[in-house]
Image (tube, rainbow, N blue to C red):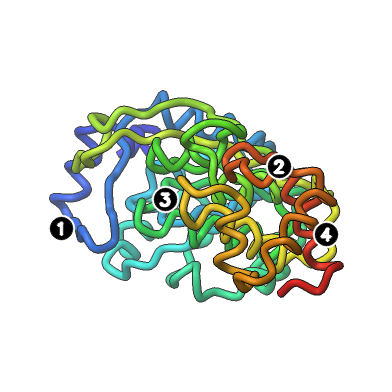
């Protein structure tokens, strides 16, 4: 059979599933995309070329993988489900520059993987259709480990994508927005209806591109403390920034000290966390850190 019959067509996808007697595991969040137009947008957003590499997480039966193989000089696909390995071995056979790794990306040594597999490429992007239930842990691992990445282009739950790209002042803006925007520049690529998957999930998805920052957008005295301040500030969204910080860092008798430090950071105590920009959170965490607050 001609390999150019795309895996992502409904007919071909069903044929592969039936041939191998594959059954979907809900616990692994398996939903196979059957829309070639969306796959094209995903690969296009990664800005790949014949000198670059791609890391795919959760290749499934290889629908996105074959598209990446056409666009990049090296593709490494990490698959946690052992049942999919023989399928991938067959459908990806024409592509000698594709390597399938069996494992859990959350447990893999990604620094070592990059050194071993991508040493001859000019740049690497992560491209994936991520299971909803592990979206945030996977993305934060990719960002926090400071891998030599250009882009992370992923299809995730639409609601989560909107939170990652949100600006201050809206209901979607929160600690996840700040964490993602600290490490990258997010951009929504497109919305993906739930009808273009087998099986169909209950909610719509979205493709988001995270352009990985080479330099951080703000300077913080202590990165871990910065994120702790952010998380604490959003602990109860209805509360003011002063009340949330008081609950986490200050005893009742130290209320005046908190107000002094907020004034030093030029932040009104009555404001709520969703109104603060990443620059204001950096200023706040630096003032608190330098005052010895822990």
**Circle 3 SS class:** loop
Viewer-side residue, 8 vs 110: 110
Judge left or right: residue 198 versus residue 170: left
Q: CA distance from mark 2 to mark 4?
A: 14 Å
Mark 2–mark 4 CB contact (< 8 Å): no
Residue beneath the point at 30% across and 39% down: 1
Disc on the earlier residue, 4 or 1:
1
Query: In front: 125, or 226?
Result: 226
**Could you tell me which quadrant the C terminus lies in?**
bottom right
Residue 92 appears anywhere in the view: yes
Image coordinates of residue 104 in percent, x first then y, are: 44, 71
Gap in angstroms between the C-alphas marked 4 and 3: 38 Å
Upstream in sequence: badge 3 or badge 2? 3
Q: Which mark is residue 130?
A: 3
Say which element carries label 4: helix
Q: Residue 246, located in which quarter of the rendered image?
A: bottom right
- Residue 189 vertical position relative to residue 32 in the rendered view, above or below: above
Q: Which residue is mark 2?
A: 268
Query: Is there CB contact under 8 Å for labels 4 and 3?
Result: no
Image depth: mark 2 or mark 4 in front: 2
Q: Which mark is residue 266?
A: none
Mark 4 vs mark 3, foreground winner is 4
Q: Which residue is mark 4?
A: 287
Residue 23 is tagged as 1
Q: Nearer the viewer, mark 3 or mark 1?
A: 3
Q: Indicate the secondary structure of the residue bearing disc 2.
A: loop
Q: Is residue 96 visible?
A: no
Give the spatial CA distance, label 3 vs label 1. 18 Å
User: Who comes first in sequence, dot 4 or dot 3?
Assistant: 3
Q: Residues within 10 Å of mark 2 (few under 14, many from 20)?
A: some
Q: Earlier in the sequence, mark 3 or mark 1?
A: 1
Q: Position of residue 281 (x, y in %)?
A: 72, 49
């Amino acid at each position: 059979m001609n390999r150019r019959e795309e895996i992502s067509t409904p007919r071909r996808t069903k044929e592969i599933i039936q041939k191998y007697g594959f059954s979907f595991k809900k616990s692994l969040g398996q939903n196979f995309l059957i829309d070639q137009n969306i796959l094209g947008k995903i690969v296009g957003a990664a800005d790949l070329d014949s000198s670059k590499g791609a890391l795919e997480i959760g290749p499934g039966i290889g629908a996105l993988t074959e598209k990446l193989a056409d666009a990049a000089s090296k593709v490494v696909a990490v698959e946690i489900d052992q049942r999919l390995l023989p399928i991938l071995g067959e459908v990806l056979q024409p592509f000698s520059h594709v390597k399938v790794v069996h494992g859990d990306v959350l447990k893999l040594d990604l620094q070592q993987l990059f050194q071993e597999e991508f040493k001859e490429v000019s740049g690497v992007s992560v491209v994936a259709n991520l299971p909803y239930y592990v979206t945030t842990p996977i993305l934060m691992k990719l960002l926090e480990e400071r891998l030599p990445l250009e882009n992370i282009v992923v299809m995730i739950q639409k609601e989560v994508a909107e939170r990652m790209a949100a600006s201050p002042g809206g209901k979607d803006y929160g600690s996840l927005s700040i964490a993602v925007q600290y490490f990258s520049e997010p951009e929504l690529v497109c919305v993906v209806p739930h009808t273009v998957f087998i099986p169909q999930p209950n909610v719509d998805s979205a493709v988001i591109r995270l352009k990985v920052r080479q330099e951080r957008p703000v300077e913080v005295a202590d990165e871990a403390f910065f994120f702790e301040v952010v998380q604490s500030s959003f602990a109860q969204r209805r509360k003011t920034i002063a009340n949330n910080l008081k609950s986490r860092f200050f005893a009742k008798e130290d209320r005046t000290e908190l107000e002094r430090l907020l004034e030093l950071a030029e932040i009104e105590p009555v404001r709520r966390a969703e109104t603060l920009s990443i620059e204001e959170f950096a200023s706040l965490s630096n003032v608190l850190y330098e005052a010895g607050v822990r």
